[in-house]
Image: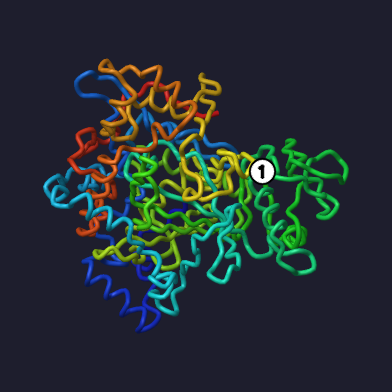
Amino acid sequence: MKRIPLSLVSLLLVSSGYASPIKAEYIQGLERANHIHYQRIDNERAAYITSMCYTKVEDNQTHHTFNPCYSCHTKGKTPNYTNDSDLQLEYNFPMEILKNPYTNLFKDRRAAVAKISDAAILKYVRDSNYFKDDGSIALASMLPKDWRGYRPDCYYHFDAEGFDHDPQGVLTGWRAFRYYPFLGTFWPTNGSTDDVLIRLPKRFGTTMDGHFDRETYALNLSIVEAVLKQKTISLPHAIDEAQYGVDLNQNGQMDRAKQIVFSGKNFFRDMSYVGQAKAALQRGQVHLAGGLYPEGTEFLHSVRYLDWDDHAGSVTMAARMKELRYSRKTEWHTYSDLNRNAQSELWESEVNQQSQTQAEIWQGNYEEGLQTGTGWVYQGFIEDKQGVLRPQTHEETINCMGCHAGVGATTDSTYAFPRKLQGVDPNGIKYGWNHWSQKGLKGIPEPKASYLGHPHVYEYSFYLRQNHSGNEFRDNDEVQQKFFDANGTLKAEMVSRLHHDISLLLLPSKKRALGLDKGYKVMVGEQSFIYGRDANVAPMSNVFKTIKRGQSTHIRTPIVQE
């Protein structure tokens, strides 16, 4: 994460400017209607520190210590040189946010929620705020013509291999993938469903003779997956290596490859993209290195309400979006660059130890996105008072940055793609190239992970043992009652069932789902996102309102993922 002098803050906050009267009218209209400010920070410039970080990890009565912190704050895997596992042990916050700025955590919305019927909330979440009635993308047409940021262009019309098509049947480049949802907050049981799509630059789908080729694009996506994960990836069908001039299976000859074989450091010497991306790699216009995406990689992430399917008897993804998040890799950073960036953060923390951690300042603006300092920009859209998607403000966008720009858990600043399912049978439950609307969470076996002293453990079960709840705030009573007995011991039978089907943990009941939908809908009416976006209905009790300087969590030993 890049720090800049405070003297430049005011310059950065107006750097997006109003480039035209049309844009000015659009933005100022949103400000008036929603009582928000696009360039001014009203609550806290340290909003990149999440609301979950204020969790009381020690129980006031039993003094038992829980640890949800390890899921994000850990020792990164090269080339993520961040090791922030010390944040499991101490609440190390900037002075200005020792008082918890996320006051929405303490709001009691039960009376307001009670006024919303189940039928009303189901009607609301089933009404798309992304598409118009004619199938066009609402936000794409509402944004000013000279909008410099991302203009939504995904139609969520996926074929059997997850490729998105526009109304004319042309591929948009977006490809959906299914993944193991990250621990805690993004489990649907905590209030939201979500999906993630990836897109590579056009040259990754273009043959040497300049034509788009679906297999070339799919193969490059698989190469990116193998490179990012630094592991062998099986292919859905055998590939003629001679056609592409790349030894995919790393056996020293051009034959038919059924895998992209990760073989250690020689892999990065011998591996290449295919098609015009291969030529660009040879010219130094794009790069290939373990644990990193090529320049121009994009991700689209929709965060949605919870819907209910009576026929299936379970939660499904709603049509209505809470947020639409977009990121793009704009710069290539070498291992040395990334190491220097991480070490500078460590050095600054050590220098400022006496005066407490200093708040970060993020370069960029709400329109074109904020920069991570690791080569990415992030921007997003969120519901306005009427439920229509609008651009996030500068301050609302800051809220995205902490998780993507300096924690040990990420791989090249991302969470979902490193967790992509790897099955190759399109009919199989673990086939990764699908959208959640095509194939859901039911029947997916529990993933495994390696933690220090706990090799190859079931990841979700391990989280439950460490945290004794289904979220960081430990207020998910439904998960606690389902998975723990009256003494707080994990139920062996439930854990055994979880090993074979993660939906048992991740999907909430209809009652809980609709309650969380209603709680968030009330927040939309308030437009109070800068004070927290958690879909709580009742005030939270396991959260600090104020943190003391240098306060210990009382966790004795950090948990580190190997």
Q: Residue at x 83, y 53 (%)?
A: 245
- Amino acid under disc 1: Ala
The residue wearing badge 1 is 226
Residue 274 at x, y percent in the picture: 75, 56
Side of 498 relative to 249 (left or right): left
Q: Nearer the viewer, residue 500 or 234?
A: 500
Element type at marker 1?
helix
Tell me the residue at 38%/75% (across/down): 142
What's the residue at 18%, 43% (across, down)?
A: 106
- The image quadrant of residue 548 is top left
Q: How is the image coloured?
A: rainbow
The x and y percentages for residue 94 are: 31, 44
Above-or-below relation of 382 to 54: below
**449 left or right of 266 in image:** left
Decide if residue 355 is in sight here: no
Q: Can you name the residue that lies furthest to the left here?
A: 111
Eyeballing the image, is 560 above or below 240? above
- Tell me residue 222's x, y (percent): 67, 48
- Quadrant where the C terminus lies? top right
Q: Depth check: 260 or 427 in front? A: 427
Furthest-front residue in view?
A: 311
Can the viewer see residue 416? yes
Q: Is residue 7 left or right of residue 329?
A: left
Residue lying farthest to the right in this orientation: 253
Using a 10 Å C-alpha cutoff, classify the residue at mark 1 as few (fewer than 14 neighbours), some (14 to 19) or many (20 or more). Answer: many
Could you say where residue 207 lies in the image, as x and y percent from the top left? 76, 63
